[in-house]
Amino acid sequence: MLSRPKNTFTLKQDPRETMVRSSSSSPKIIQRGVGLKCLPGEQVHEKSLRVRKRLHFKDGYHDVFGTLYCTSYRIAFRPDCFSSTQDSSQEVIFDSDNDISLPCADRILAVTNQSKVKVVTPSLSLKFVPEELLIYCRGFQLMHFHFSDNGLKTEAFSMTHTMAKNQQVISSQVQQEAMLRSLDKRETTTLMDYPTCLFESAADWENELERLGATAWRVTPINERCDTCTSLSKFFVVPSKLLDNDLKKSFAHFQQRRIPRWSWHHPGGSDLLRSAGIQTNTDPNKDDLR
């Protein structure tokens, strides 16, 4: 028997040829009305057909036709165009590119004739039928919608009013839930719930010194009125052997009068201090700097 050759090679296909074939066999885009899959308990309050969503780019914009929904939870847009290979049963319920939850909508602006702009609120009644809607989100996202050009329709007015009304309702519900959660946290507060210490009082620094075991340091109120150094806190930590009278003399030797002050203590005995640079006209060998 002939032995199998040891030297083999693999012929790889040119990636550019693969791209050409894949582009020629790309799925066609067909027109079809895609409905909205609702969340549990969600209800569609308003629906507007043939709405254009404007996508802004650096070199211009592009309009996508679709259906605009306003539900009890969100503002949703479903394009009319979709890929024929996409299974409709696998459609996502919430599309981050086309859906906005009502609590995330910061402002809703109604525009007509590119001159009249009005912030939409439930208590404010619009005196014109809007042609465009600008929805500014809290996450710095902008949703831009245009209604049909064949005359001003009442759908735009009712859609705008429903958005503002539902936004107010769900925002109040979110605030009530947040208040209830805060009350529950207060009732269930345990000893393991440590608040954030901002070190705004002398007691905060004293507790920190006691916690780290820094016995050679003390808290000074020399800057309590912020007149010694305006950029430092009212209380900070200095060596215990250093008197306040000597401490006042050392402020002038540091830039912006920011003297060395204690920040942290290592269990091994070393300490971490912070300070600004020494003034250029100061001679550490001549001046009494401790």
Image (cartoon, helix red, strand yellow):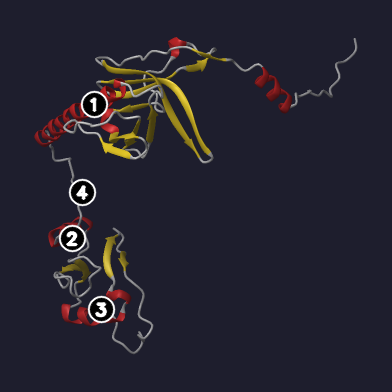
In which quadrant will I find the C terminus?
bottom left
The residue carrying mark 2 is 205
Q: Earlier in the sequence, mark 1 or mark 2?
A: 1
Q: Amino acid at mark 3?
A: Phe
The residue carrying mark 3 is 251
Mark 3 Cα-neighbour bin, 10 Å: few <14, some 14–19, many ≥20:
some
Mark number for residue 161?
A: 1
Q: Nearer the viewer, residue 165 or 275?
A: 165
In which quadrant will I find the N terminus?
top right
- The quadrant in which residue 18 appears is top right
Q: Amino acid at mark 4?
A: Thr
Q: Nearer the viewer, mark 1 or mark 3?
A: 1
How far apart marks 1 and 3 lie (CA) works out to 62 Å
Q: Amino acid at mark 2?
A: Trp
Rendering coords of residue 223 (x, y %): 17, 71
Q: Amino acid at mark 1?
A: His
